[in-house]
Amino acid sequence: MMNNVAAFWLANLVCDAIGQLSLKAASRAAGTDEGSSHWKKLAQSPWLWIGLAAFALEYIFWLSFLALVPLGMGLFVGSANVVCVMIGGRLLFDEKLTPMRLAAMGIIVAGIAMVGWGTL
């Protein structure tokens, strides 16, 4: 069962990161037009559809993961997605990782580690 838990969690993590980063790419590709022009460009972006497909898969993996772990643990471990998306934003979109954001990531990682150890 532990292998299934890890597999569902990792699949959820990957799909969430792909979804978030794809939607960011779609919004950047659509530019800053206003009104229907913006939405038309957005709808034509393959990144939008990749992001939505990734979120659909993530939903399935997340439900499968939550079926195997206590909700409290699932929510804490699920917060690892924030770390992945922040790192992805830095690598793909040159977003800033300020000292405050790095500290927040450290706190998230420490919390995940403590929750994980509590299940051993």
Image (cartoon, rainbow, N blue to C red):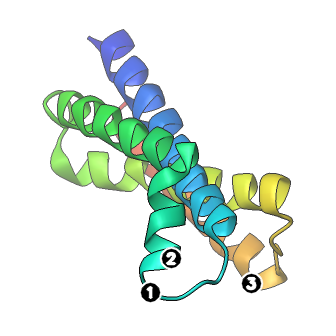
Compared with 40, 12 (above or below) is above
| Quarter where residue 12 is shown | top left
Across and down, in percent, residue 79 comes to 45, 56
- Which residue bears the numbered disc 2? 37
Amino acid carrying mark 2 in the image? Ser
Q: Is residue 1 above or below residue 106?
A: above
Position of residue 16 in the picture relative to residue 33 (left or right): left
Which is closer to the viewer, label 2 or label 3? 2
Give the left or right position of residue 53, taking residue 65 as reference: right
C-alpha gap between disc 1 and disc 2? 6 Å
Residue on which disc 3 sits: 100
Report which quarter residue 117 is drawn in: top left
Identify the mark at residue 114; answer none if there is no mark: none
Quarter of the figure that contains the N terminus: top left
Residue 47 pos. (x, y %):
56, 46
Type of amino acid at the residue the image marks with label 1: Gly
Q: Position of residue 32 (x, y in %)?
A: 64, 83
Circle 1 packing at 10 Å, graded few (<14), some (14-19), many (20+), is few
User: Residue at coordinates 29% horizontally, 38% vertically from top-left?
Assistant: 56
For disc 1, the marked residue is 35
